[in-house]
Amino acid sequence: MKKPEKMKSSDITPESVFMMKRRNLLKLLGVGATGLVVSSAVKADIFSWFSDDKPAAPKIMLKELKFIKPKAYQADLALTPENKVTGYNNFYEFGLSKSDPAENAHTMKTDEWTVSIEGEVNRPMTLNLDDIRNKFSLEERIYRMRCVEAWSMVIPWIGFPLASLLSLVEPNSRAKYVAFETLYSPKEMPGQESRFIGGGLQYPYVEGLRLDEAMNPLAFMATGVYGKELPNQNGAPIRLVVPWKYGFKGIKSIVKIRLTESIPPTTWNLSAPNEYGFYANVNPNVDHPRWSQATERFIGSGGLGQVTRQPTLPFNGYSEQVASLYDGMDLRRYF
Ligand SMILES: Nc1nc2c(c(=O)[nH]1)N[C@H]1C(S)=C(S)[C@@H](COP(=O)(O)O)O[C@H]1N2
Ligand SMILES: [Mo]
């Protein structure tokens, strides 16, 4: 996300060509027969989709989940196909290419997982995965997802409202923010100790929301996607989804949630504070310093030549539900 050369890939993208036969792809990447200019960073990204030379990741069986489908969240939108939702990811702990998480995240062990919820709460607690399964009933929500890199998807998540989890621990009157932390385990997540793999971010990955944002009904804890439990590359066993914010707010593989009085540090803001703010609300009118946020490449079922560029919507299309959280705030200043 930080590297300028990674962002210049907008004319041709890995997702637009990954369905092609390698033979055709090589032709395409060769000389200018097609007239397309492809940066070397994008070539590397495209080639890793094919990964002939890399060992195939083990096929992992994911459990089917039981869930309801509340009408209010069954948006009438074309879904991004499952193989792209689970094959084109950002999870820098496992590498910087979009295909790295799917190939490498199997080294993370999720069966003995716990999430501790602590800080400014009346009832701090540590939940294991059985506790989470028993305390929260699951629902499916079809949400738009807009990465700050200007690509987007529509994803059928399964999980429960973050507000349900917060009500359980009872935030006290000092609680104003919610801080989240990803697992820290360099043995399982090689990017946490190698800057070549992990891009030199500070780990563990941390994120945060204001308490009123966290209590908004749209803020969601996902434990599944596409009818099954989350694959590791999507943030197993539990991750945050905040559909009106850029994707990097959706912290994966959470082990700690802490209610705080003051604003918590967040990973991308620590890394480049002039480029990534705390709020990170999707906003077509506030550009990233290095690229426009006015439009986005929707990753749908199409292949090469069918990448849809579409306008980006304020709050990613969720203004009605969330705009009032920011009444009176200058969204250029609080980007
Ligand atoms: N721990 C952790 N969480 C993370 C990231 C990451 O690198 N590490 N990447 C973020 C970014 S930039 C995006 S766009 C989303 C991608 O989620 P997905 O791969 O499930 O689509 O995860 C977010 N959560
Ligand atoms: Mo992102």
Image (cartoon, rainbow, N blue to C red):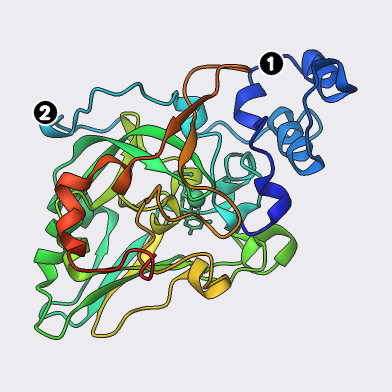
The quarter of the displayed image where residue 75 is located: top left
Amino acid type shown at disc 2: Lys
- In terms of secondary structure, where does tag 1 sit? loop
Residue found 83% across the figure and 25% down from its top: 29
- The one nearer the camera, 148 or 105, is 148
Image height of 124 relative to 79, above or below: below
Pointer 1: what residue?
20
On-image quarter of the C terminus: bottom left
Residue found 12% across the figure and 57% down from its top: 164
- The one nearer the camera, 18 or 285, is 285
The quarter of the displayed image where residue 46 is located: top right
Query: Left or right: 306 with respect to 218?
Result: right
On the question of residue 63 being in view, the answer is no
Pointer 2: what residue?
71
- In terms of secondary structure, where does tag 2 sit? helix
Q: Position of residue 198 (x, y in %)?
A: 65, 61
